[in-house]
């Protein structure tokens, strides 16, 4: 069983991570505003969402989730290919889902612009 201090720290981490993601996403959105192609702008934003919001379950603590880019990068540095593979698999799956969402958004954009 995890003590309440660790659960509190876990909740604070995810709250801070979510706030930082929203701020970073808004900044990136304003930075790439000058790009002339709608598809390119939304592709970059979709890639950011897939990269930064994909979690992987912690092997040490049940029902705790870690950002996949952070966990995968750390495990690659340590040389743990199996653990890094789980994180990369989650990232790949999330990227495929975001690619589908991006394509559907482009279809919607083209239909509205007609």
Image (spheres, rainbow, N blue to C red):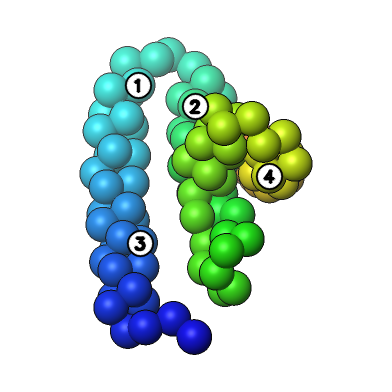
Q: How many marks?
A: 4
State how far apart marks 1 and 3 are (Cα): 26 Å
Instruction: Please say whether residue 25 is visible from this viewpoint.
Output: yes
Q: Do the numbered discs 3 and 2 sit on residues whose CB atoms are within 8 Å?
A: no
Q: Secondary structure at mark 4?
A: helix
Nearer-N-terminus badge (2/1): 1
Identify residue for label 4: 83
Q: CA distance from mark 2 to mark 4?
A: 27 Å
- State which mark lies toward you, 2 or 4: 4
Can you tell which mark lies on residue 53? none
Query: Image point 37% across, 83% down: which residue?
Result: 3
The label nearer to you, 4 versus 3, is 4
Mark 3 crowdedness (10 Å alpha carbons): few <14, some 14-19, many ≥20: some
Crowding around mark 4 (Cα neighbors within 10 Å: few <14, some 14 to 19, many 20+) is some
Asked which secondary structure carries label 1, the reply is loop
Distance, label 4 to label 1, CA atoms, is 34 Å
Q: Which residue is mark 2?
A: 44
Dot 2 or dot 4, earlier in sequence: 2
Pointer 1 local density, CA inside 10 Å: few below 14, some 14–19, many at least 20: some
In percent of width and height, residue 52 lies at 47, 42
Which of pointers 3 and 2 lies earlier in the amino acid sequence? 3
Which label is found at residue 14? 3
Q: CA distance from mark 2 to mark 1?
A: 9 Å
The C terminus lies in which quarter of the figure? top right
Query: Which residue position holds label 1?
Result: 32
Q: Nearer the viewer, residue 104 or 9?
A: 9
- Residue 68 place in picture, x, y as percent: 56, 45
First along the sequence among labels 1 and 3: 3
């Amino acid at each position: 069983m995890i003590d309440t201090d660790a659960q509190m720290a876990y909740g604070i981490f995810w709250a801070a991570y979510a706030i930082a993601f929203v701020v970073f996403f808004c900044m990136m959105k304003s930075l790439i505003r000058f790009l002339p192609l709608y598809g390119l702008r939304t592709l970059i934003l979709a890639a950011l969402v897939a990269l930064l919001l994909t979690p992987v379950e912690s092997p040490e603590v049940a029902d705790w989730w870690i950002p996949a880019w952070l966990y995968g990068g750390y495990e690659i540095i340590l040389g743990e290919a199996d653990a890094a593979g789980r994180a990369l698999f989650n990232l790949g799956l999330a990227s495929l889902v975001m690619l589908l969402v991006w394509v559907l958004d482009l279809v919607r954009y083209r239909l509205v612009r007609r």
